[in-house]
Image (spheres, rainbow, N blue to C red):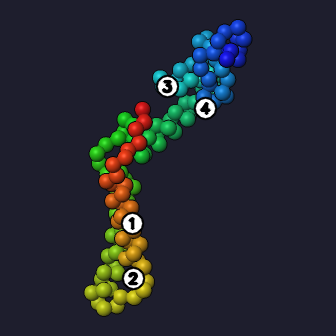
């Protein structure tokens, strides 16, 4: 593949935004891993995509943001599980348990299992 701007030079990479093959003179490296041509619109879009990727990694706790703490999603599902189980439990004590309460408990149990899955899963996403 040859450079889009210099037909006599070999391309060393492809712009992340416009997908043009680029030589050493035409390429710009952003955040040490993303390649972009020197057009302002391509650079701006590549920087924006890089920021989105970093925020996503941080939100899901992957890559350099990985930790041993349970993810926020697991905590949220556990709270929802307790929310769906606790009120029907009070009805059970008062002998006023009905089919709606049974469905609520079933949803609560599902939420607790989903929370446990997210909290204790062994496979992790490993991203740079």
Give the quarter of the image for residue 95.
bottom left
- Of circles 3 and 4, the one toward us is 3
Outermost residue, bottom direction?
A: 95
Q: Which residue is mark 3?
A: 33
Secondary element at image label 2: helix
Badge 3 vs badge 1, beta-carbon distance below 8 Å:
no
Which disc number belongs to residue 45? Answer: 4
* 4 or 2: tag closer to the N-terminus: 4
**Residue 121, how many percent across, how many down?**
34, 52
Disc number placed over residue 74 in the picture, else none: none
Q: Which residue is mark 1?
A: 111
Measured in 3D between alpha carbons, the distance from the residue under mark 1 to the one under mark 2, in whole angstroms, is 15 Å
Expressed as whole percent of the image width and height from the top left, the position of residue 124 reads 38, 44
Q: Earlier in the sequence, mark 3 or mark 1?
A: 3
Categorize mark 4 by other alpha carbons within 10 Å: few (<14), some (14-19), many (20+): some
Going from N to C along the chain, the mark reached first, 1 or 4, is 4
Q: Earlier in the sequence, mark 3 or mark 4?
A: 3
Distance Cα–Cα, label 4 vs label 2: 51 Å
Give the residue at mark 2: 101
Cβ atoms under marks 4 and 2 closer than 8 Å:
no
- Pair 1/4: label in front: 1
* Marks 1 and 4, how far apart at CA: 38 Å
């Amino acid at each position: 593949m040859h450079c889009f701007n210099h037909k006599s030079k070999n391309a060393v990479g492809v712009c992340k935004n416009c997908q043009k093959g680029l030589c050493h003179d035409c390429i710009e490296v952003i955040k040490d891993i993303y390649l972009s041509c020197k057009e302002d619109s391509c650079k701006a879009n590549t920087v924006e995509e890089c920021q989105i990727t970093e925020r996503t990694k941080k939100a899901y706790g992957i890559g350099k943001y990985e930790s041993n703490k349970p993810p926020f999603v697991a905590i949220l599902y556990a709270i929802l599980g307790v929310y769906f189980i606790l009120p029907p439990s009070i009805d059970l004590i008062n002998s006023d348990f009905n089919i709606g309460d049974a469905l609520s408990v079933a949803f609560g149990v599902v939420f607790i299992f989903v929370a446990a899955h997210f909290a204790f899963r062994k496979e992790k996403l490993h991203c740079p």
